[in-house]
Image (tube, grey):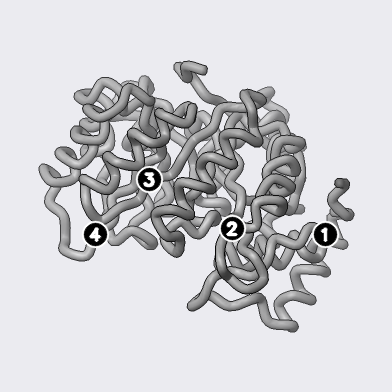
Amino acid sequence: MTITSLEGIIAYPVTPFRPDGSGIDEQAFRRVTENLLRSHPAAIAFLGSAGESAYLTDDEWRRAAKVGVETVTGRAPVILGVSELTTAAAVSKARYAKEIGADMLMVIPVSYWKLAENEIYSHFEAIAAATDLPIMAYNNPATSGVDMQPALLVQLVSKIKTVCFVKESSGDLNRMHAIRTLSNGEIPFYNGANHLTLEALAAGASGWCTAAPNLLDDRPHALFEHMRKGRLAEARELFYQLLPILGFIVVGGLPTTVKAGLRLRGLDAGDPRPPLKPLPDAPRRELEGFLATIGVGAISA
């Protein structure tokens, strides 16, 4: 499908591994994906931070991408995360994403050496030249080591034809306001910081990128709908009900906490890949309490 607009919840699955860590547990991967499809997502974005993309081999990334696309089978747009140190590796994955039928790329530059803005621009330009898939420029300095300022993000969208969207995860609401102002409100931007969701949607964000639907089902979608329809009191009430879990899963690390929560809900997505470790007992009990408080039950088969 050709994506020209996208509004709502962009849901991020985890990547389950086999118990011995030898590769991806494809059966569990499909279950995780099917569970997210029930949460009314505007799109599903595989191989982001929650999907442990940084810890996958190239072959595992490609297999996860293919299984994800095959499982969704057109029921929602599929976004594939591309986060590579080298432009050549990013271009290779972008071409593969197009080949297997993905609908969009989410590109985040990753840096060992500090990247200048012209180097970041050239990185996106090369990826865009390799495929006609639309691209979401993803800014998350805490995980990537690259901090793209609002002016650069607006430049990417304005000057590179297939860079169409921005995901802002710096946790700075002022940057979202700046993107809207600099683009005269024409660039769709998406909130990637759970704790800013109400403010970001009020500031004009087109959606919310989050791993929360893994544990909260369609509650994030309901929150978005409340905001979209101007039901601010209902939105605030639901947001503050969900906020303890939204904060917990970020502070504890998305793969670690989401996989622990899925296990508590009866869907075993395995453990995170070392050096990440499973959630310890005390925070696991805390998470269990959060889920019980808001009435989250077992995931149906």
| Direction from residue 134 to residue 239 in the image, left or right | right
Depicted 157 relative to depicted 23: above or below: above
Query: Given the image, on which type of amino acid does mark 2 rest?
Result: Ile
Q: Say whether marks 1 and 2 touch (CB < 8 Å).
A: no
Q: Is residue 178 visible?
A: yes
**Nearer-N-terminus badge (3/4):** 3
Mark identifier at residue 111: 4
What residue did someone put label 3 on?
A: 82
**Nearer-N-terminus badge (4/1):** 4
Disc 1/disc 2 C-alpha distance (Å): 20 Å
Q: Nearer the viewer, mark 3 or mark 2?
A: 2
Q: Which of marks 1 and 2 is in front?
A: 2
Residue at 57 percent across and 51 percent down: it is 194
**Nearer-N-terminus badge (4/2):** 2
SS at badge 4: loop
The quadrant holding residue 186 is top left
Nearer-the-camera pick, 240 or 210: 210
Mark identifier at residue 265: 1
